[in-house]
Amino acid sequence: MHHRRPKWLSVFALCMFLPAATCWALPTGHHGAVLTDCTDPRFFEETPASDAHVNRLERFSFTASDNTEPSSIKVQVNLKPVEITITPKRSGRFQVDARLPEPVVAGRAWIRVMGMSVDGCHQLHTWNVYADSQ
């Protein structure tokens, strides 16, 4: 009779031979298994664009690649969570729209997007928009 080793035991054994920082940085998938190959999701087509100057920032949008797990997308502005609306596009990509609870009227708005691909890779994307109140 052949006994299977639990997956966690294999990961533990692997960690014994790798530097701690490397081992604990190994990506894991939805079911906790270590990933050997995955594709990062991408976030692009930001509106307003990176480093844009606007009178006030109330809304913004971006596109997420077709391999993005839509439920994993989280957005923050200046480290505060922002509610988003995700709309699938015909291309398979996702249109992500955000409306701030309070507009940014002066200074920098640091937009931070986090998400995961359907095969388990994590991605962080950031950009700045500057509000120049008049």
Image (cartoon, helix red, strand yellow):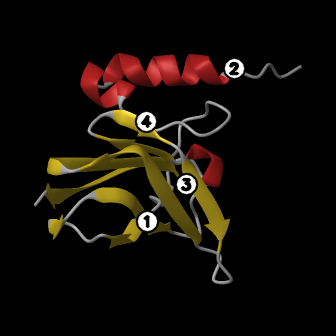
* Residue 35 percent coordinates (x, y): 53, 43
Looking at the image, tell me whether mark 4 or mark 3 is earlier in sequence order. Answer: 4
* Residue 103 percent coordinates (x, y): 33, 48
Kindly report which numbered mark, 4 or 2, lies closer to the viewer in this rendering: 4
For label 1, the SS is strand
- Where 30 sits versus 105, above or below? above
Report how far apart the C-alphas of labels 1 and 3 lie in the structure.
19 Å
Residue at the disc numbered 1: 61
Kindly report which numbered mark, 2 or 1, lies closer to the viewer in this rendering: 1
Residue at the disc numbered 3: 117
**How many C-alpha atoms fall within 10 Å of the one at disc 4: few (<14), some, or many (≥20)?**
few
- Where 29 sits versus 132, above or below? above
Q: Is residue 19 visible?
A: no
- Where 3 sits versus 56, above or below? above
Residue drawn where x is 65% and y is 76% of the image: 92
Looking at the image, tell me whether mark 4 or mark 1 is earlier in sequence order. Answer: 1
Looking at the image, tell me whether mark 1 or mark 3 is earlier in sequence order. Answer: 1
Q: Amino acid at mark 1?
A: Ser
Report how far apart the C-alphas of labels 2 and 1 lie in the structure.
46 Å
Looking at the image, tell me whether mark 3 or mark 2 is earlier in sequence order. Answer: 2
Residue at the disc numbered 4: 81
Q: Is the residue under label 3 in contact with that under label 1 (CB below 8 Å)?
A: no
Viewport quadrant of the N terminus: top right
Residue at the disc numbered 2: 5
Q: Is residue 56 left or right of residue 124?
A: left
Residue drawn where x is 26% and y is 25% of the image: 21
